[in-house]
Amino acid sequence: MVTREENESLTRVGKGTPGGEFLRRYWHPVVAAAELTEEIPIKAVQLLDEKLVVYRDTTGAYGLVAEQCPHRRASLAYGRVDDEGIRCPYHGWKFDAEGNCLETPAEPNGSTLKDSICQPAYPLERLGGLLFAYLGPLPAPALPHWDVLAWECGQRWVQRHSVLNCNWLQAMENSVDPSHLYWLHGQTAHLAPAVDHYEEAHDFTTFDHGIMKRRTSEGEEGARVDQHPLLFPTILRHVFKSRDTGKMMHNLQYRVPMDDTHTQIFMVLFAPDEVTRTPPDSDTPFEYVDMRDEDGAYRLDFVLAQDVMAWETQGPVADRSQEQLGAEDRGIHIFRKLVAEQIETVAEGGAPLGVNADGADDEVIELEVINQRIGLTRPRTEIVVEV
């Protein structure tokens, strides 16, 4: 059982909290690069309980700074950009991507006030159609080049889903809770055509980047394996076959903690093929996906919205001290234990699981994903699919 004190440690994301300091050791996506255009170059975002503004200046460079101007606290989200940075709409104070104050226009000639002003600013990197931010202590670690972000032989696109009204941990625990697939998604997921009753075996293995989940289920054609990882701490790496196109869809699902009770989900999808080439730094199509219909009800004919229903109805922050866990919840226990251990590692001054502290590695990280139900029978492949 998780005590209320332990639950607080696991779930709180603000600066100075144990969980918040742990999460600040990782890169997190804040926006799809395609959301920032010449017409709309500024967007307000929230990450780890910090209100921020991400922008694209007139040279095409990006910046991420605290939302409120240090002068009179007006929002920079309504400012404007030039070739040097972002300017406050209220009195024209201007800041560059490092947080340096470049101009304080109303001050008298010769004023050195700007030299004493520093706006909080954070590193940004662009990869696979997303802009990633790092809010932790410098120097920043390397941004992981996951396969779906870095592959080139195929088509890539990015989705941002409607904001999840609950804590990030509820979404991530779902990734090591394989028994829910049959019951929650059985009529709509890829499982439905192959399995007509619940009969599964589950294995969980920790590795350098998180937890590898392996499901073995029985069907008409015998046992089949579904293997994919939870990438620490906020990512699910998955694969499925599109019912519309029949194409194999590799994807990364980022569950980004906005604050204690809201989570932003980004999904990067990649459909391998032998014709299309999509470099990881190329322009990437973007779409917004709402998990609710026009009346505000969950879209329960949609797999991802089924998950959202299950996560949100646990409450804004699930009270884990009231749970009654069983044998099939072993993956959740492993994940919580691992998070708690990494929180302690950070508190003791160490680097948590999966963090490359030297900040210099851009090697593509290939992940051993298998899904025999849909024809992906071998790991570490972009193109070769057996049907």
Image (spheres, helix red, strand yellow):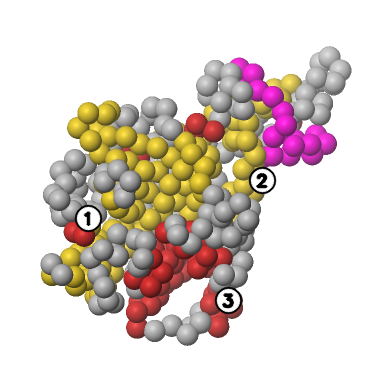
Task: Report the amino acid beneath label 1.
Answer: Ile
| Number of the front mark, 3 or 1 | 1
Magenta-tinted stretch = 65-84
Mark 3 lies on a secondary structure that is: loop
The quadrant in which residue 260 appears is bottom right
State the residue position of label 3. 319
Q: On screen, 107 above or below 52?
A: above
- What percent of the width, then of the height, locates residue 11? 55, 66
> Which class describes the residues within 10 Å of circle 3: few (<14), some (14-19), or many (20+)?
some
Front residue of 321/385: it is: 385
Give the main secondary structure of the magenta stretch.
Answer: loop
Magenta residue check for 82: yes
Query: Which residue occupies 41% across, 69% down?
Result: 184
> Of callouts 3 and 1, which one flags the residue occurring earlier in the amino acid sequence?
3
Mark 2 lies on a secondary structure that is: strand
| Structural distance between the alpha carbons of marks 2 and 1 | 42 Å
The quadrant in which residue 37 appears is top right
Query: Which residue occupies 48% across, 39% down?
Result: 287
Q: On screen, 175 above or below 146?
A: below
| Number of the front mark, 3 or 2 | 3
| Number of the front mark, 2 or 1 | 1
Which mark identifies residue 374? Answer: 1
Label tally = 3
| Structural distance between the alpha carbons of marks 3 and 2 | 26 Å
> Which class describes the residues within 10 Å of circle 1: few (<14), some (14-19), or many (20+)?
many
State the residue position of label 2. 51
